[in-house]
Image: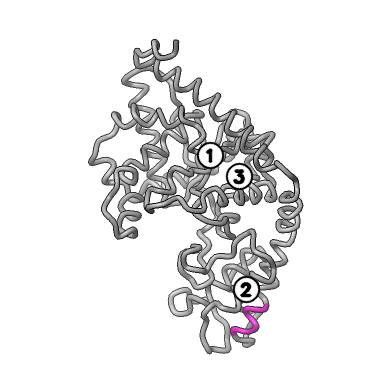
Amino acid sequence: MDSFTATAARMPSLERRIADDPSGFRILTGERPTGALHLGHHFGTIRERVRLQELGVETFVILADYQVITDRDASDGVAANVRSAILDYLAAGLDPEHTTIFTHSAVPELNQLVLPFLSLVSEAELHRNPTVKAEHAASGRSLSGLLLTYPVHQAADILFCKGTLVPVGKDNLPHVEITRLIARRFNERYAEVFPEPEALVTETPELPGLDGRKMSKSYGNAISLSMTADETAALIRRTPTDSERLITFDPERRPGVSGLLQAAAACLGTTPERVAEEVGAAGSSGLKTLATEAVNGFLAGHRSRRAELAQEPGLVDDVLRRGNARARSIADATLREVRSAMGMGYANV
């Protein structure tokens, strides 16, 4: 049994434990603010965060601005992306009273944990990480030190607050495994400081872009949560499809048609096959009309709340200020524990 299958098999038991004692868990999740959050983020991560928050699980959401430059030369647009993401979080239902939203760069104590953590992993272990290998291959660039050590930085993100749950898809499971390894090695070498976090495998499959490829702003195939209804309609109209009248779900042969079917199905709470049956022989025009109505109908409430929140002066700054302050306080306490465990308590004076 592979690692992902074994982890997924444990999910029913883990979900029962969370339901029985939500206050006994602390979740760390987040993303790199490389662009506007889109429909894939909503179904893949944001909806799950809101669910866990409402169950009573203490939640931390990191906007990993430092990690934007793991595979690019500049950090253009990061400030705007951070602010946009916070508006989307709030509109989706994340509550700053129960969820700590913060940025990587504002918590230097967190980043100081990377140094001792680097001593706990080998170069070979870092090179074996599948995400590092995939992102390096996709970048077409030489492997930077930041990208190579990306898993260690993520371990610091998780462990600074002693996170015990990390929602992941199949591709991200190795990051949790190396975090568990770092926590275990630190505890064995120095003292029991860190819990070994558990992966919480989300059931939502990855939502592809409208053209069937990975949903990405760079591909122009992503429906951003901040788009207007008209912008969404225009993007869907531009999606390349084919001339076949009968609409069928066939991701390999008909990627554009299938991408639209999946977007509509996610928003309607059904399957792509059922959406295809509903469109029938209405062709791509009928499919695009249905997809536009489904997506705009689904996002209408989010967009309305987002617009109202955007009119509140100082709201985003206040959320970020409070989140950063809380994250720094927790990171400082953890760093003091780490220093003491390593015999460097004099640094805490």
Q: Is residue 1 visible?
A: no
261 lies left or right of 139: right
In front: 46, or 226? 226
Q: Amino acid at mark 2?
A: Arg
Name the dominant secondary structure of the magenta segment: helix
Q: Return the residue at label 3.
A: 49
64 lies left or right of 237: left
Q: Return the residue at label 1.
A: 103
* Model colouring: one colour
- Residue 336 in the image, given as x and y percentages of width and height: 45, 18
- Residue 87 in the image, given as x and y percentages of width and height: 66, 49
Q: Amino acid at mark 3?
A: Arg
For the residues labelled 3 and 2, the Cα–Cα distance comes to: 28 Å
Crowd band around label 1 with a 10 angstrom C-alpha radius: few (<14), some (14–19), many (20+): many
Q: Earlier in the sequence, mark 2 or mark 1?
A: 1
Please tell me which residue is depicted at 44% across the width and 13% down the height of the picture. 348
**147 above or below 198?**
below
**149 above or below 190?**
below
Q: Earlier in the sequence, mark 3 or mark 1?
A: 3
Which residues are drawn in magenta?
284-289
Q: SS at mark 1?
A: strand
- Confirm or deny contact between disc 3 and disc 2 (CB under 8 A): no
Q: Earlier in the sequence, mark 3 or mark 2?
A: 3
For the residues labelled 2 and 1, the Cα–Cα distance comes to: 41 Å
Q: State which quadrant residue 54 falls in.
A: top right
Q: Name the quarter where the C terminus is drawn.
A: top left
- Mark number for residue 242? none
Please tell me which residue is depicted at 39% across the width and 28% down the height of the picture. 183
Q: Return the residue at label 2.
A: 274
